[in-house]
Image (spheres, coloured by chain):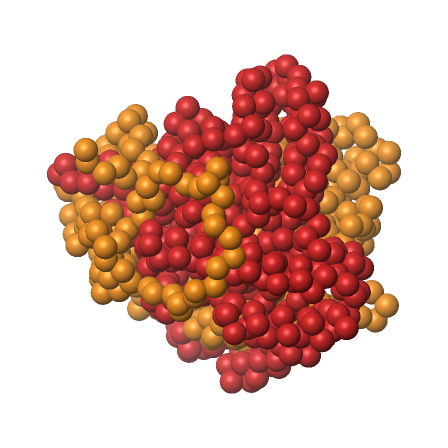
């Protein structure tokens, strides 16, 4: 069963047959004709089915079990979303059809954009960015365009907390900014004093995640916003953690000028084994002119697609974004409505606090105040004293069918495990996970080797990632 | 209503009680000054049946054409049932990036196989696990080739205009000069290129077949580019590689492209699939996830995310890109598509596209739709039109046919894939004859 599809291949086997066509246009141009073999798999339909069903059984999604992967919001992905995204009127329309033949698509995207405006307190959205990091990059370009439009050209720095996700500094750098790191304080928030010393006439923006990657709401958010704005900078909101605050608090009201959301997190679109996601970007009024080409806009009482606009930052990709992903998110918003979104956030917060309270006597919670939708524990002490690491705990969780938390992030917490249970998990599931975490902790104290040997029940034992990087084998090569 | 929260109100209260907290306690970290002290101005939640009705009403306002003669970056091909069914397996759909290798061998192996297939198609040594789409793949490729000494990127004007704009957008604040290579008779102007080679040239980017469907003189371009130490980036249609030379054969350094044709719906522009492949000496410059083969503790073959020292979660602002989530599920779908077609099937797809397009072009010529550029092409071509393009679009639309893309009032970019039947092609010709009179 663990054959590669290339090893399953048998010369001459076929799966799909096309309709016959005898139409002849021209002979193929000899100078362009491929000479080398094309070694794609040759299999029958039953072979491909068995192969991929076999692979699917060696994968684990939210549908298989608890997936408290912090920062990623692995909530349940409603089946309804899949059905709406499969409607022929969405799945089979060409992106360059005449506009009057895609009114429904424009209306749906506009509906989504307007809903996201209300949830976040922003004035306009673009749904073009394909993922969170893409949204960040978009946001940085928007901020740059804004400052340039005001001839405020000396702003070369973007400030990013040391607890920020790696994509934040990387996206700021892609937009040409110098990245300045600001420390976190003892409560896990931004160190206000250090921030004050870093803010200057060079500050283009501060990128902030709130609640942050420790699952904590920054209590000084108003003061931070004021400080940045007074210095002429803008405030960028990484919305990866919006799941904690829907209907409770809005980045737009906190003072943020630009936000990105991760629809594949907060708005229940499936993660697909790594993507596609969707990373819409919302802005306050003064930044609207710069939104990219390909954004759905209202113009003269009709919906239109922004095109070749002088002020726009350009475009982030082709067409209008991950459309079917956006359709799924709209489906979710309609399903939950104002009451459901709020209830989702409140239960995300409840579930996280429930788990935290029930683990904190054993596990060291890095910042043990009331958390929002996630919390971070540190295995630093256990690593020092018992040689049991965050990774060992994670691997042991695999043996009880739980996807481990995010490991080693945020980097400011050593041996970090970031736990995000999500609102779509029941009390029984949480209780089961709590017991598993506790049992593993006890094993760590008594038999650390057992954890270092984990996992035992997975299709492969612990995988050697050092070997993989040292002598990379990145594709299959047929044995000589 | 939150249909997807399993815990009842009573259970929620019980949980609060167990941890000795109230709802107010839990929300206390949100400072009063930034609380939303009202309900969101959205309608209340509704049942899934009502949601479906609403979404279906939006879908119904869109016209699904029976016949599509429009490509320009989005291509309708036949998609086998087996691809749709297998890609919908929940384990694939509801997992995330395979950080935990032991729990994700199925996903990792599927990506490893995808990478292999992309390298088979392009002749390259390594592929990443995907990027957002074809246009952003071009932009990422340009970034791969630029360093302190080489900061000039030359883009063929025959690239998809969206790719050109995406590159310009991506690089606008980086120390990269992007210039456009003019076009001559629908192909890259080689003489211009020869005259504009400089020491600081990082890369030359072409599309093949180009935006107008035309096959570029790839070998000649490659020779010119490599007469300096610059890199050649080619954006290719993966279907065409079943019949046309793979980029490695003419010396391309990076092959990228839009892999939507490999089993993905046209879906109003996304999700699509950007692929990127390169030679072994440039692997460490690739952005995004890469899967490698390794061993587990027992010495058994296993797969894992690798070469992560390039990536944002390790390198932060020094990473090769900020790319994190990619288009993994689209890559999985593409691999399933390629597997279901196999080498013979894919060749059949490509040659049907080729022959049907060439057939239509010849017949159109007889109706006074003149070929704009007399150049070799794959499955797209540009003609002038005997009547206004508007008139053509409207006439065909009445018969559920999406005409080619009007480039201006009297030129049109046509596309024919295997999904257009012989019968449909004859119908199209009949209708065009009608409208041209
Ligand atoms: C806090 C935070 N910011 C940004 C991102 C990037 O989002 P994406 O993976 O969609 O690009 C993530 C996702 O992992 C995240 O957790």
Q: In the figure, the red chain has which letter?
A: B
| Any part of residue A199 in sight | no
Q: Nearer the viewer, residue A325 or A294?
A: A294
Q: Is residue A370 above or below residue B435?
A: above
Percent from the top left, x then y, of residue B312? Answer: 49, 35
Q: Seen in the image, is A457 located left or right of residue B338?
A: left
Percent from the top left, x then y, of residue B274? Answer: 51, 47
Q: Residue at x 65, y 38 (%)?
A: B187
Location of the C terminus of chain B (image quadrant): bottom right
Percent from the top left, x then y, of residue A199? Answer: 72, 31
Q: What is the tally of numbered marks visible in this picture?
A: 0
Q: Seen in the image, is A144 located left or right of residue B229?
A: right
Q: Quadrant of residue A320?
A: bottom right
Residue placed furthest toward the front: B366
Q: Is residue B286 above or below residue B362?
A: above
Q: Is residue B289 above or below residue A440?
A: above
| Any part of residue B373 in sight | yes
Q: Residue at x 72, y 61 (%)?
A: B368
Q: In the figure, the orange chain has which letter?
A: A
Q: Nearer the viewer, residue B348 or B107?
A: B348
Q: Residue at x 61, y 80 (%)?
A: B60
Percent from the top left, x then y, of residue B215? Answer: 57, 42
Q: Quadrant of residue A319?
A: bottom right
Q: Quadrant of residue B178?
A: top right
Q: Seen in the image, is A420 located left or right of residue A338?
A: left
Q: Residue at x 31, y 38 (%)?
A: A475
């Amino acid at each position: 069963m663990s054959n590669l599809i290339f090893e399953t291949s048998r010369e001459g086997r076929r799966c799909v047959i096309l309709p016959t066509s005898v139409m002849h246009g021209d002979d193929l141009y000899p100078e362009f004709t491929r000479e080398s073999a094309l070694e794609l798999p040759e299999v029958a339909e039953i072979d491909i089915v068995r192969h991929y069903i076999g692979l699917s059984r060696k994968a684990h999604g939210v549908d298989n079990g608890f997936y408290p992967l912090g920062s990623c919001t692995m909530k349940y992905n409603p089946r309804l979303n899949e059905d709406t995204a499969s409607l022929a009127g969405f799945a089979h329309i060409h992106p360059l059809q005449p506009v009057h033949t895609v009114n429904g698509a424009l209306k749906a995207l506009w509906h989504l954009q307007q809903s996201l405006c209300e949830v976040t307190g922003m004035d306009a959205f673009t749904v073009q960015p394909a993922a969170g990091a893409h949204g960040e990059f978009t946001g940085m370009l928007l901020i740059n365009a804004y400052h340039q439009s005001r001839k405020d050209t000396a702003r070369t720095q973007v400030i990013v907390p040391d607890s920020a996700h790696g994509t934040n500094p990387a996206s700021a750098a892609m937009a040409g900014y110098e990245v300045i790191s600001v420390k976190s304080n003892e409560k896990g928030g931004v160190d206000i004093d250090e921030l004050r010393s870093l803010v200057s006439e060079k500050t283009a923006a501060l990128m902030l995640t709130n609640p942050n990657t420790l699952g904590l709401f920054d209590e000084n958010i108003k003061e931070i916003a004021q400080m940045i704005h007074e210095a002429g900078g803008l405030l960028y909101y990484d919305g990866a953690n919006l799941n904690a605050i829907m209907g409770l608090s809005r980045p737009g009201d906190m003072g943020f000028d630009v936000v990105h959301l991760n629809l594949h997190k907060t708005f229940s679109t499936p993660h697909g084994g790594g993507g596609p996601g969707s990373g819409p970007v919302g802005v306050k009024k003064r930044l609207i002119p710069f939104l990219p080409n390909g954004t759905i806009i209202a113009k003269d009482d009709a919906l239109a697609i922004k095109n070749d606009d002088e002020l726009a930052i350009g475009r982030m990709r082709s067409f209008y974004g991950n459309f079917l992903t956006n359709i799924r998110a709209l489906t979710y918003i309609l399903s939950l409505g104002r009451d459901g979104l709020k209830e989702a956030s409140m239960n995300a917060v409840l579930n996280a606090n429930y788990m935290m309270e029930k683990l904190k006597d054993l596990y060291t919670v890095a910042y043990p105040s009331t958390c929002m939708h996630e919390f971070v524990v540190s295995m630093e002490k256990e690593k020092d004293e018992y040689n049991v690491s965050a990774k060992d705990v994670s691997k042991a969780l695999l043996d009880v069918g739980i996807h481990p938390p995010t490991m080693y992030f945020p980097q400011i917490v050593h041996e970090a495990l970031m736990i995000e249970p999500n609102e779509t998990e029941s009390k029984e599931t949480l209780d089961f996970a709590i017991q598993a975490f506790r049992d593993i902790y006890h094993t760590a104290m008594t038999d650390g080797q057992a954890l270092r040997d984990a996992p035992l029940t997975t299709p492969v034992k612990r995988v050697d990632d050092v070997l993989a990087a040292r002598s990379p084998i990145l594709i299959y090569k047929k044995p000589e | 209503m939150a249909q997807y929260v399993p815990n009842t109100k009573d259970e929620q209260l019980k949980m609060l009680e167990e941890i000795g907290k109230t709802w107010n306690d839990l929300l206390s970290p949100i400072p009063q000054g930034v609380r939303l002290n009202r309900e969101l101005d959205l309608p209340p939640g509704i049942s899934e049946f009502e949601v479906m009705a609403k979404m279906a009403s939006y879908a119904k306002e869109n016209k699904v054409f029976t016949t599509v003669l429009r490509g320009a970056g989005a291509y309708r091909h036949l998609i086998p049932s087996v691809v749709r069914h297998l890609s919908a397996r929940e384990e694939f759909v509801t997992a995330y990036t395979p950080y935990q290798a032991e729990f994700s061998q199925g996903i990792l192996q599927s990506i490893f196989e995808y990478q292999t297939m992309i390298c088979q198609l392009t002749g390259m040594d390594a592929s990443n696990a995907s990027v957002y789409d074809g246009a952003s793949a071009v932009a990422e490729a340009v970034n791969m080739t630029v360093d302190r000494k080489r900061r000039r990127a030359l883009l063929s004007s025959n690239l998809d205009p969206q790719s050109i704009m995406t590159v310009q957008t991506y690089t606008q604040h980086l120390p990269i000069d992007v210039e456009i290579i003019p076009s001559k008779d629908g192909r890259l102007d080689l003489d211009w290129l020869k005259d504009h080679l400089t020491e600081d040239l990082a890369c030359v980017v072409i599309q093949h077949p180009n935006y107008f469907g035309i096959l570029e003189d790839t070998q000649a371009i490659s020779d010119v580019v490599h007469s300096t130490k610059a890199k050649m980036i080619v954006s290719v249609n993966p279907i065409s590689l079943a019949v046309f030379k793979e980029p490695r054969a003419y010396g391309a350094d990076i092959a990228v492209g839009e892999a939507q044709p490999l089993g993905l719906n046209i879906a109003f522009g996304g999700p699509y699939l950007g692929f990127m492949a390169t030679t072994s000496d440039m692997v460490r410059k690739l952005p995004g996830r890469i899967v490698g083969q390794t061993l587990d503790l027992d010495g058994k073959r296993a797969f894992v995310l690798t070469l992560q020292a390039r990536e944002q979660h390790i390198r932060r602002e020094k990473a090769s890109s900020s790319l994190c989530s990619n288009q993994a599920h689209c890559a999985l779908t593409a691999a399933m598509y390629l597997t279901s077609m196999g080498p013979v099937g894919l060749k059949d797809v490509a040659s049907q596209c080729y022959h049907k397009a060439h057939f239509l072009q010849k017949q159109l010529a007889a109706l006074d739709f003149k070929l704009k550029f007399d150049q070799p092409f794959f499955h797209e071509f540009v003609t002038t039109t005997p009547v206004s393009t508007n008139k053509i679009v409207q006439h065909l639309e009445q018969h559920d046919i999406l005409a080619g893309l009007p480039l201006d009032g009297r030129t049109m970019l046509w596309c024919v894939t295997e999904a257009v039947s012989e019968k449909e092609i004859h119908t199209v010709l009949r209708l065009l004859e009608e409208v041209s009179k």
